Image: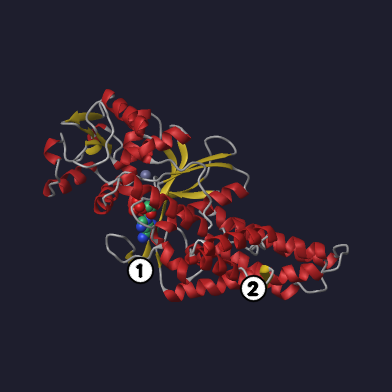
């Protein structure tokens, strides 16, 4: 399997640290608002990478953090006059709902920065002890020039960076030994959340979070560290400096970065205001379509979000889902008989397409080409599978298509029908809500059932339901 490694700017053969295992850290969102569809791109892309590893039989330890202490969260908490944890907890929950709707599997662990402060203090102390960091007026800074490999990921030359820095003055720069030094710990300002530390009551810098959470849950050296390409510098460069200076071993063997999701060829971002939240888009389209749209292009390239491209993704996805539906129908009515010679030959064609799918994925996760292989399977099925085929043959074709859709995170199974007992429980809850004059909840339940094709009728004997 080949992975493009940002560290070497080359596609390299993937060799795991421990045979059969993959340790992966993906930088997660700062939770001060709903995530936008740009933030969803790394989630979808690296979830697909994980799914492919799992398909290949690897045991994947997938860690993705929530940055739940940050200036933007504090600002929002001040605006709403609540504790900053109220904001972060709210948007962590909302983010998890969006991830589920995008069919992104929950990480093995989703650590939160605020719950890992002890580990951060420990690593900062190690860096001070080793001469890579120094305290100053309650802050602690990383001594950038003390790490000889600084710039190896972003390919930036430290002297050029220094020259660039001379013209921009940042607050706090005057207390640093060198403008290139970056903050590991900062003392609190009035009204900010803070933790006790040997240097001041304060909070950690952003970069130290990921170094510490990655070490705690995955170890000093990991297989893959990933995120959007905007994180290469300074975030990932600084993570490498901190981790390698503290631990004395290489931090991550493969660095993977997704390209931007653009709108009108400009990066979608909250600060530019040109963004759509996943929630808004989910009201317009099933989020499966957005997932499929994101995987239709190579993860390293930019993708432009437009109505036309989403419509094209919808058509493509519909083609796959219709084919699966037809195959299910054929399967239900197919004859039980021994698989025929011709069918065996047909199976070979599917095996060749499966190989094509795998080759695409093994070439730095080329999901665009992998999707083409699935389309080829769909074409073949539409052309060759009929009511005359055996159950065994149809089952095998269905199984193959399903496996590959599953790697892409595309759900092909119809929603399970609701059980009668679940419906009755909801009807009871609705009756109770009506009694309490909570008509909003009562209507919500009626609409929810209606969406699943269940109609309620008031009769003399009580409420009855029927499936339509
Ligand atoms: P943030 O909350 O800004 O730290 O972003 C969380 C993740 O989303 C990071 O991996 C970012 O690189 C990624 N990201 C943010 N905006 C975009 C975008 N427009 N396209 C792709 N990835 C993005
Ligand atoms: Zn990070």
Q: Which residue is mark 1?
A: 263
Q: Quadrant of residue 372?
A: bottom right
Q: Is residue 275 visible?
A: yes
The image shows residue 327, relative to residue 125, as above or below, that is below
Q: CA distance from mark 1 to mark 2?
A: 47 Å
Instruction: Quarter of the image for the C terminus: give it.
Output: bottom right
Query: Where's ligand 1: which quadrant?
Result: bottom left
Residue at the spot 41% in from the left edge and 34% down from the top edge: 250
Q: On the rendered structure, is 337 left or right of 107?
A: right
Q: Which residue is mark 2?
A: 457
Classify mark 2: residues with Cα within 10 Å, few (<14), some (14-19) or many (20+): few
Numbered circles on residues, count: 2
Q: On the rendered structure, is 335 left or right of 269?
A: right
Secondary structure at badge 1 equals strand
Could you say where residue 359 lies in the image, as x and y percent from the top left? 59, 56
- Colour mode of the rendering: secondary structure
């Amino acid at each position: 399997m080949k992975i493009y490694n940002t560290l070497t700017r080359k596609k390299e053969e993937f060799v795991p640290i421990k045979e059969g295992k993959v340790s992966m850290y993906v930088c997660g969102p700062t939770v001060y608002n709903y995530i936008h569809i740009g933030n969803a791109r790394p989630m979808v892309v690296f979830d697909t990478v994980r799914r492919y590893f799992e398909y290949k039989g690897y045991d994947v330890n997938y860690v993705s953090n929530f940055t739940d202490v940050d200036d933007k969260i504090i600002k929002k908490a001040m605006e709403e006059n609540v504790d900053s944890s109220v904001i972060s907890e709210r948007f962590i929950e909302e983010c998890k709902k969006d991830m589920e709707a995008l069919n992104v599997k929950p990480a093995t662990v989703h650590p939160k920065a605020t719950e890992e402060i002890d580990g951060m203090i420990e690593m900062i102390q190690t860096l001070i002890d080793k001469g890579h960091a120094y305290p100053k007026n309650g802050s602690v800074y990383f001594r950038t020039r003390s790490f000889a490999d600084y710039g190896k990921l972003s390919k930036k030359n430290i002297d050029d960076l220094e020259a660039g820095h001379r013209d921009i003055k940042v607050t706090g720069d005057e207390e640093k030994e060198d403008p290139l030094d970056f903050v590991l710990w900062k003392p609190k300002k009035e009204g900010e959340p803070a933790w006790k530390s040997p240097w001041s009551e304060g909070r950690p810098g952003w970069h130290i979070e990921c170094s510490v959470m990655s070490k705690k849950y995955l170890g000093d050296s990991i297989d893959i560290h990933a995120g959007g390409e905007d994180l290469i510098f300074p975030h990932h460069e600084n993570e490498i400096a901190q981790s390698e200076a503290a631990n004395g071993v290489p931090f991550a063997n493969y660095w993977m970065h997704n390209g931007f999701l653009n709108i009108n060829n400009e990066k979608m971002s909250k600060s530019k205001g040109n963004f759509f939240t996943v929630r808004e888009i989910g009201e317009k389209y099933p989020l499966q379509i957005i997932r499929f749209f994101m995987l239709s292009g190579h993860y390293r390239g930019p993708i432009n979000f437009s109505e036309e491209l989403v419509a094209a993704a919808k058509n493509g996805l519909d083609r796959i889902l219709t084919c699966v539906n037809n195959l299910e129908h054929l399967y239900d009515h197919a004859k039980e008989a021994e698989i025929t010679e011709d069918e065996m030959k047909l199976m070979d064609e599917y095996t060749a397409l499966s190989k094509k799918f795998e080759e695409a994925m093994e070439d730095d996760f080329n999901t665009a080409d992998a999707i083409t292989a699935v389309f080829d399977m769909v074409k073949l099925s539409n052309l060759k599978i009929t009511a005359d085929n055996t159950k065994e043959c149809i089952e095998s074709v269905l199984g193959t298509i399903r496996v590959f859709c599953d790697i892409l995170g595309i759900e092909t199974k119809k929603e399970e029908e609701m059980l009668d007992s679940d419906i009755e429980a909801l009807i009871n809850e609705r009756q109770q809500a009506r009694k309490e004059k909570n008509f909003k909840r009562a209507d919500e339940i009626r609409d929810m059932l209606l969406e699943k094709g269940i109609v309620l009728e008031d009769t003399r004997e009580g409420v009855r339901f029927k499936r339509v």
